[in-house]
Structure formats: C-alpha cells, structure tokens
C-alpha cells in the first residue's frame, strides 16, 4: 500500500500560503509527515494495521500537522526532527478521535470511505481509536516530559468536550456549547501550534501567542461550519443545508436565536425545539432561521474571534509566516460571511 494515497495533503496545502518558497518547503515537510504517519500506523498484526490505516489513508486536509509545521517556521530550527514527530502526534490523536466519533454518531461514511464501524463493527472501531491514542502517547514520550504533560492536558479537554456535547447544559446553553467546541476542536489545534513553536525553537512569548491563536482559530473554524450549515446552499457547501438543524444538533446560530426574548420568535422557538424530520417543518425552520438576526450575530461573533486571533500575532515579525497565519484567520471569517 502506498504511503501517499491519492488526494492526500502533500498535493496541496490546507492553509493559504502565498509565499512560494514557504509553500514548497511545507509541502516537502508534509510529505515527510505522510510517510511517518503511514509507518506509525503499522502493527505486527496485518488486521490492526489495516484498521489503523483505514482513515489515515483516506486522506483529509491534515490541517493540524500543517499548523505544526507552519508554527515551527516562527522558530530558529523549523527543520528539527521533533517537529515531524509532533505533527504525527496531533494527527494520530485527531484520527483516533474520528473512529470514536463515527461510533457515537453511527456514521457510515468518513472522508468518502466507509467508516471503520461500518466496514467492521463498533468493537473494532472503538479499539482501533484506542490503539491510535496509545500510539500517539508513545510518540509524545519521545518528545519529553513537558510534551507528555501538554498532551495529557489536551486529551483531557478533548474527551471532556466530547462528553459535555452529549449532556444537558447545567447553566447557559450558549456558553456550554462554546466550551464544548473549545474542548473538542480548539484544544488540539492550540496544541498543534504550541508543539510547532516549541520544537521549532520559538521563544516562550511566541509559543504562548501561537497557542492562544490556535485555540481561537480552531474554535472559530468549527463555529463557521455552524453558520454554513444554515446559510449555504448544498452546491456551495458540499452538504445538505440544515443537516445539523434536522438532527437537532445545537449550533451557534440556533442557540443565539433561542436566546432571543422577542415574542415574534415564538414560532421559530417552537420549531427549533421540535422534531424536524418532517421536510415541511424543516424547511420552515431553516427559512425563519436564515431571516433571523441570530445568523448575522453569529457571523459577527466569528469575525470578532478571527480578529482577536490575528491581534495575537503581533509578537511575530512581519513576513510570510505571520501573513499565512493572518490569512487563515481571515479565511475563517470570510467563509462564514
């Protein structure tokens, strides 16, 4: 089996990079990451190897390892071997979480391929996710005790976010949801930026700034998906509009609409709390939500978060690395507009 499946991230980059030299350097490093990932997903058992490589070989944007490599460019030694190891740690952790997500969501497809639970069963999918988490722990140990502590704290937040997603909020529903997104998505992306800065030889000040940047941009990227689920047409977003709405998944615009105290929103509130499996009710709810001020409020929130992330980059010197990070924050804002 080829270590570089067709359509993997080595053919293009998940982040906007205008500097040709930087882009080429990142592509070469991503090729190293792809080869390493393929090797790390090997087991003495052919069955375990096939299961572990199933989603890795399906591709994906590889955003997290790419952010590791880009953040490392802010340091004095971006080519240090530990940078590639750290990139593998975050991607293997992410992919392991996808195996578990698909079981919980009863998903049949992932990245255009059959999910592991659909191809085999839930038992295999869960244990394969566990195996990948164990593998990421082995790799983290190679990076030293500080990295182990960072990874443990990140994994705690990731799992806690996943748990909280499935429970009723104890307080403010919107804040509960933002905490879930920060845990499930923001935490690992923050660690991606932290690892890159740390193992690329950046200063502690730059490391802390990029960690905070990663947390904000990672969460904002997920929140922009919430907006696109409501606002975009299927030919624009590649998915059926209102999928989360139909499935009763709480998202940023929905929660902001539910927070409204305007009596005119009574019908929308009724629909948002109802079973929207019925096509007519789903269409009515989607139409009302698209017209509601909550949609613009959600967009404004994401744009503000993107600007907050960009402001953190002032500790970096002007140049292609800082520009690429600023451009990504802008992409997050624009895609929700």
Image (cartoon, rainbow, N blue to C red):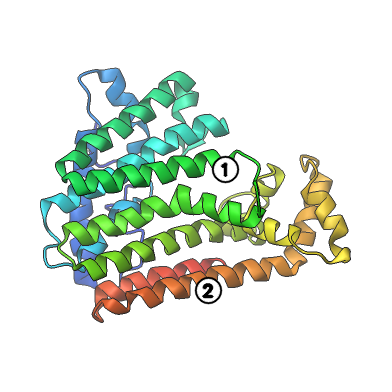
Identified at 61% across, 60% down, the residue is 227
Q: Secondary structure at mark 2?
A: helix
Side (left or right) of 37 relative to 261: left
How many numbered badges does the structure rendering display? 2
Task: Please report whichever mark, 2 or 1, sits nearer to the chain's N-terminal start.
Answer: 1
Residue behind mark 1: 165
The C terminus, quarter of image: bottom right
Q: Are marks 2 and 1 in contact (CB under 8 Å)?
A: no
The N terminus, quarter of image: top left
Side (left or right) of 45 relative to 297: left
- The residue carrying pointer 2 sits among few (fewer than 14), some (14 to 19) or many (20 or more) residues within 10 Å by Cα, namely some
Pick the front one: 100 or 52? 100
Side (left or right) of 313 relative to 264: left
User: Distance from label 2 to label 1 (Cα)?
Assistant: 24 Å
Decide: is 180 above or below 14. Answer: above
Pick the front one: 284 or 164? 164
Decide: is 106 above or below 329. Answer: above
Residue behind mark 2: 304
The extreme bottom residue here reads 318
Checking the image for residue 118, the label placed there is none
Identified at 60% across, 73% down, the residue is 300
Q: Quadrant of residue 287?
A: bottom right
The location of residue 159, given as percent across then percent down, is 45, 40
Q: Quadrant of residue 259?
A: bottom right
Can residue 6 be seen here? The reply is no
- The residue carrying pointer 1 sits among few (fewer than 14), some (14 to 19) or many (20 or more) residues within 10 Å by Cα, namely some
Pick the front one: 205 or 64? 205
Q: Secondary structure at mark 1?
A: helix
């Amino acid at each position: 089996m080829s270590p570089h499946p067709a359509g993997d991230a080595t053919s293009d980059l998940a982040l906007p990079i205008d500097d040709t030299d930087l882009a080429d350097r990142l592509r070469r490093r991503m090729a190293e990451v792809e080869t390493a990932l393929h090797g790390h997903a090997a087991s003495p058992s052919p069955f375990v190897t096939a299961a572990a490589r199933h989603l890795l070989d399906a591709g994906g944007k590889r955003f997290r390892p790419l952010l590791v490599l880009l953040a490392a460019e802010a340091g004095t030694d971006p080519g240090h071997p530990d940078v590639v190891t750290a990139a593998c740690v975050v991607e293997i952790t992410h992919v392991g979480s996808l195996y578990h997500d698909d079981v919980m969501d009863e998903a049949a497809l992932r990245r255009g391929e059959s999910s592991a639970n659909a191809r085999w069963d839930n038992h295999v999918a869960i244990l394969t996710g566990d195996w990948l988490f164990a593998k990421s722990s082995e790799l983290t140990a190679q990076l030293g005790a500080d990295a182990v502590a960072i990874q443990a704290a990140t994994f705690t937040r990731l799992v806690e976010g996943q748990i909280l997603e499935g429970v009723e909020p104890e307080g403010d529903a919107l804040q509960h949801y933002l905490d879930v997104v920060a845990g499930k998505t923001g935490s690992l992306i923050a660690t991606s930026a932290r690892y890159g800065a740390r193992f690329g030889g950046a200063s502690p000040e730059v490391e802390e700034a990029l960690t905070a940047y990663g947390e904000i941009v990672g969460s904002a990227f997920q929140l922009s998906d919430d907006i696109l689920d409501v606002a975009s047409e299927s030919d624009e977003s590649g998915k059926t509009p209102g999928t989360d709405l139909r499935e009763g998944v709480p998202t940023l615009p929905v929660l902001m609409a539910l927070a409204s105290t305007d009596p005119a929103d009574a019908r929308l509130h009724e629909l948002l709390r109802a079973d929207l499996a019925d096509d007519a009710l789903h269409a009515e709810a989607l139409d009302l939500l698209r017209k509601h001020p909550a949609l613009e409020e959600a967009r404004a929130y994401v744009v503000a978060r993107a600007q907050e992330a960009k402001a953190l980059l002032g500790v970096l010197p002007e140049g292609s690395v800082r520009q690429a990070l600023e451009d990504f924050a802008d992409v997050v804002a624009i895609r929700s507009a």
